[in-house]
Image: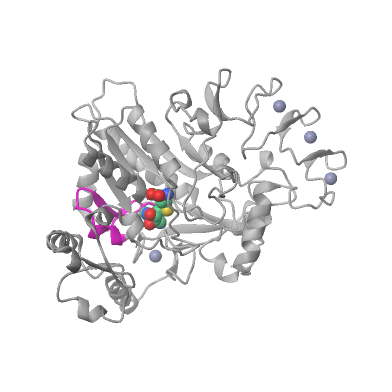
Amino acid sequence: MESCESLGIEPILNEKDRPAPRCPHGPTLLFEKVCEGGSKGRRFYACSACRDRKDCNFFQWEDEKVSEARQLAREEENKAKLPAFTHKQYCARLKKFVDLPLQEKKFCAECQLLLLPGEQAAHSSHRLTEVTSAQLRRPSVLLRPLENKKSNAQYLFADRSAHFLLQTLVQLGFKKVLCVGTPRLHELIKLRNLEKKDTPMQSLLLDIDFRFAQFYSQGEFCHYNMFNHHFFGGEVSRLILQSFLSESDGDKVVMVADPPFGGLVKPLAHSFSLISQAWKTQQSSDGGVTEMPMIWIFPYFFEPRIVECLPSFRMLDYQVDYDNHPLYKHGKTGRKQSPVRLFTNICPRDLVLPKEEGYRFCSVCERYVWSLNKHCPKCNVCPSKDGREWKHCSVCEKCVKPSWKHCGACGRCCLPDHSCGSSAGQGCFNCGSLKHKRKVCPHKDTQRTSKNWTKTKTGNKIGPVLKAKAKRKSGAARRAKKAAALSS
Ligand code: SAH
Ligand code: ZN
Ligand code: ZN
Ligand code: ZN
Ligand code: ZN
């Protein structure tokens, strides 16, 4: 395994002849180490959802023989990791809970559990809070956001972004919203229905966080892993999704996904394609439409990867803000730029970005752009990706970041303080190699790697196995590095 200079780990998605072994997060993914020169390393299975071995340490070589004893132990382990209650049980509990008098409606902050009478004694040393019916309708506020930086951090939309999304979907005439990893949007849709001012919208939440099963019926929430399109609830959940995707009453469906940013693009794109395919089977064949409308929320620097996997997707300039993200939320004074964008196969012309927040329509590009994103007549696009005003370099014949200067020695634009020929900004933006540029990268189809990510300053992308080897930086150092990367 150590025989080659590793460039990264690539998930293999099209080898379906053998069923993958399962970890507590459903079927594992097959990975392959890609080496300098394009040679391939030994393949292995690892958890689809967790990029930290601390969270899920499943590992198996593709050609490994697994003894029956180990197989059984594994199944035991998978069973042991199942939630305390089934979704049905949670629904029955909720029914009882809503009928309790207010002073008996208790939520255990430690266990993140709505308690029924008689259960409080077992939680006597825990912090219990009273739950009003208003709070019961806002699980994303009541529940503590998951904080696992690698796999499962929950970054909740700030009000302005949540309302922008909802308003946009309403204006586009969607009647059903498939919320994949967007619990706050799901919640807002249900709240809007309660107000009964407009025609109601249906919403189905797919999320790996099973705590939501305490608040929603089986028709409103499915326990789901978006990295392997796995329904923990099995066939029942699959059918719930299938019927949600039908537009029999002319109710248009849209998907809005906000995956964890450390996630692998390829498996996500694969799952979203499977959702789109399921949608397609529900369509009458008369319309020319072939793809389910989708919005995928992700940082702008993933644009090449996303567009490569889903060619019909375009990145919009809209900057998504979060409540609890240390870097991406607005400061009290002035606006902090968020690197998070919407990627969508909906026509950009139809996605009206709010003028009062500084967006305008570019009639040449036929899309809404950020105020500082000025149209370049030479490139004939609004070129900025990161929200700053880019400038045209006549030697490179393209627009570049404002902080870059053209370097004669390197023959390209770079940060002024780079060391010629060896800077981190040099080399291949796809695989991190210093020996070639992205255009001629032999691994164009491979995932960016942990190595490359730390090199390219974003520092949060760790492969499932490489992670163990990766040097850990302190949280503060990482955050500082990230901040620097966003503004350089
Ligand atoms: N901005 C969103 C939350 C995004 S945080 C909002 O405000 O609604 C990412 C979400 O994806 C979380 O809800 C998390 O529980 C979920 N998630 C993380 N990993 C997942 C996986 N493998 N499969 C499905 N959902 C996942
Ligand atoms: Zn796992
Ligand atoms: Zn230009
Ligand atoms: Zn240049
Ligand atoms: Zn140089």
The answer, for residue 227, to whether it is visible in the render is: no
- Please name whichever residue, 199 or 204, is drawn nearer the observer in this view of the structure: 199
Give me the residue at 22% from left, 53% from top: 216
Q: Let me know if residue 291 is in the magenta part.
A: no
x then y, percent, for residue 205: 29, 48
Q: Which residues are magenta?
A: 210-231
Give me the residue at 34% from left, 55% from top: 140
Position of residue 43 in the picture relative to residue 117 (left or right)? right
Q: Let me know if residue 213 is in the magenta part.
A: yes
Which residue is most to the top? 363
Which residue is most to the right? 409
Q: Hey, which quadrant is residue 392 in on the image?
A: top right
Q: Is residue 92 above or below residue 118?
A: above
Q: Is residue 198 above or below residue 329?
A: above
The answer, for residue 199, to whether it is visible in the render is: yes
Quadrant location, the N terminus: bottom right
x then y, percent, for residue 313: 47, 33
Give me the residue at 31% from left, 42% from top: 178
Q: Hey, which quadrant is residue 234 in on the image?
A: bottom left
Position of residue 487 in the picture relative to residue 20 (left or right)? right
x then y, percent, for residue 402: 73, 38
Q: Is residue 408 above or below residue 211?
A: above
Q: In the rendered view, how is the structure colored?
A: one colour
